[in-house]
Image: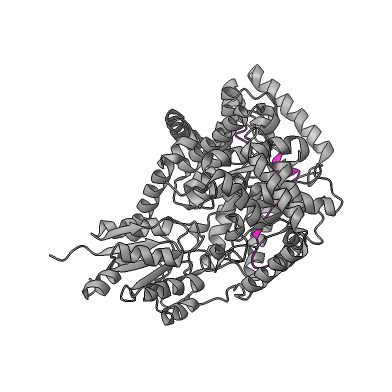
Amino acid sequence: MDRKIRVLIAKPGLDGHDRGALVIAQALRDHGIEVIYTGLRQSPAQIAQAAIQEDVDVVGLSSLSGGHKTLFPRVVEALKERNAEDIPVIGGGVIPDEDIAYLEEQGVQKVFTPGTPTTETVDFIKSTVRGEDNE
Amino acid sequence: MDEQFRKQYERWKDAVDKTNERFPERKEQFTNHSGIEIDRLYLPDEQGQTNDYVEHIGFPGQFPFTRGIQPSMYRNRFWTMRQYAGFGSAEETNERFRYLLDQGQTGLSVAFDLPTQIGYDSDDYMSEGEVGKVGVAIDSLIDMETLLDGIPLDRVSTSMTINAPASVLLCMYIAVAEKQGVPKEKITGTIQNDILKEYIARGTYIYPPKPSMRLITNIFEYCASEVPKFNTISISGYHIREAGSTAVQEVAFTLANGMAYVDAAIESGLEIDQFAPRLAFFFNAHNNFFEETAKFRAARRIWAKLMKEKYQAQNEKSLRLRFHTQTGGSTLTAQQPDNNVVRVALQALSAVLGGTQSLHTNSRDEALALPTEESARIALRTQQIIAHESGVADTVDPLAGSYYVEEMTDQIEKEAMAYIDRIEEMGGAVQAVEEGYMQREIHQTAYETQKKIESKEDIIVGLNEFQLEEEVHEDLLRVDDALEKRQVEKTQQVRKERNQSTVDSKLNDLKQAAQDESINVMPYILECVKAYATVGEICHTLRDEFGEYTGV
């Protein structure tokens, strides 16, 4: 058997709204994924460090403060600096559609906007990590 | 008619007369479109005019305040329409404030950016990407002077959503008022100053619970004598609800937090009636209409009983739960955002029928970004329509006596009290927060809510039912990314121009004061602020003494 998929859920920046991050974390766990949650106020460097130390397959970022355009690309960069650009970064939160293209250009794999069913995120993670088709 | 009923009825009528002398009712006679006169207050029929009514529900403005805290409520004055606003620089926010006042808003409510709320200056490395995003960036007194420029602080009341650094921002407000020639005894407004719900739900804490509680009681004590018209705390269920709690949990955890502040203040040597009249509350108005109205009524009754029976407050003002309401941000959908206008209208109506003292209505686009000027205007107009067109404000507590609403009020009271008792058994709210109890309860509810939405047990219009193939994209407000750089330069300029040795000596005085628990730090913070020490410098000084909270 493959080992369990491991995901780091992180809150970059100063935003304290963690309802979404916690709900996603629990939903992933309910679907057999191991989740490490960083807690609030993590710098991009801390997040990259944690991702490597915990040997995760995916990093999931959550921000509701409008800081995503600065903070999400910083996490991608911080992973690259540590030769860990193979760990895909996904994100969610209060993110206007028009910012998604920019974030994807900056190396964020996928952005999930408000109202996305958690199952969609689960499927995306599974297919990204294992190359499985979406159910 | 029972004797008790007659007596209290007379008392209520006297109170109405007294109020009317000060603030005459909005109209001499209230009638509906059919020409039927609308009474100030509707009461039970003869059979219901009992002692039980008096004790359980009571007259408006009387214990246990189920029907409201004033004798004739909105017949005299509407609630305060207070829209939370702030973004970018102090200049931009000042412009939005003036716009809102011009549009008929009656009070200000300041949103600060996250660095300000967590005690970092705009040029701190921790602030990167967050400056001016969710509110206005305030570093030094200069920014506060700009923010409040041209706004008469003797006439406008200001609510500030600021918690861990509440003492600093209040001191800045005092300093600006003094520069305008308004003494601190005259300024009115509210600081949120509710740290417990930051640990539970909102996340902008700085210091650990114990020194945080000291700062809060220092503010209570200072304001009781120096700033007597300012609400020293706004004990908030809003964010607890946003984090996912039920209505019952919102009431229970908020009032349990309120009790913790009361306990701390009493322990520090204050008398209950010295500070209790200045405690204010802040609740959420969510989707379930009658549940929400019942919740507000229940919260008022519980608090009144606690204050009277548990804390033996003598001053009637100590028993009154005064509250601000904001419609529920987490109920807004990013899909078909115009539908949010309707959600907000219903939520706002539940708050008005629940007897709120002030209200913020959310804007339709807030699931996506901060509101545009147009969206903010519609949100304010929603309140104005409820006030001026719907007629719901013409009589007091119109839902009283509804079998459903009274029963729901009783049930919410009962279930909230069960939680409150449980928290008391754990040793009070501070202990419960440190153990993560409330956090776990809220998270569990949030997750269940998500599952209900995904299984369509709960229908959210436009989100999991009645969707559109193609969403229309509205114009959104964008905060200028260059703002961060400008704000950093501005603050560095302030550092260059101020008298550094004064700043150093004032910060050092504060450091000494912080080390001695028996000293009230407020006068020291005021001195620092006046010397143009920054929010970050003041908070770092206190961080060095108090340490930092890092979560459960």
Give the quarter of the image for residue B362.
bottom right
- Examine the rendered structure and indicate whether residue B37 appears above or below residue A81: above
Residue A49 in sight = yes
Q: Which residues are magenta?
A: B65-89
The residue lying toward the viewer, choosing from B422 and B45, is B422
Q: Determine which quarter of the picture holds residue B378.
A: bottom right
Percent x, y for residue B130?
A: 56, 66
Give residue B278's position: percent from left, percent from top.
69, 37
Q: B401 or B219: nearer the eye?
A: B219
Residue sitting at 44 percent across and 63 percent down?
Answer: B461
Q: Residue furthest front?
A: B501
x and y, in percent, of residue B125 in the image = 55, 65
Q: Is residue A11 magenta?
A: no
State yes or no: residue B83 in magenta: yes
Q: Position of residue B432 (x, y in %)?
A: 44, 37
Q: Is residue B473 above or below residue B57?
A: below
Count the marks: how many?
0
Residue A65 as seen in the image, left or right of residue B41:
left
Which quadrant would the N terminus of chain B be assigned to in this image? top right
x 30%, y 65%: residue: A119
Q: How is the image coloured?
A: one colour
Q: Main secondary structure of the magenta part?
A: loop
* Extreme residue toward the top, this view: B3
Q: Residue furthest right?
A: B181
Residue B31 appearing in the image: no
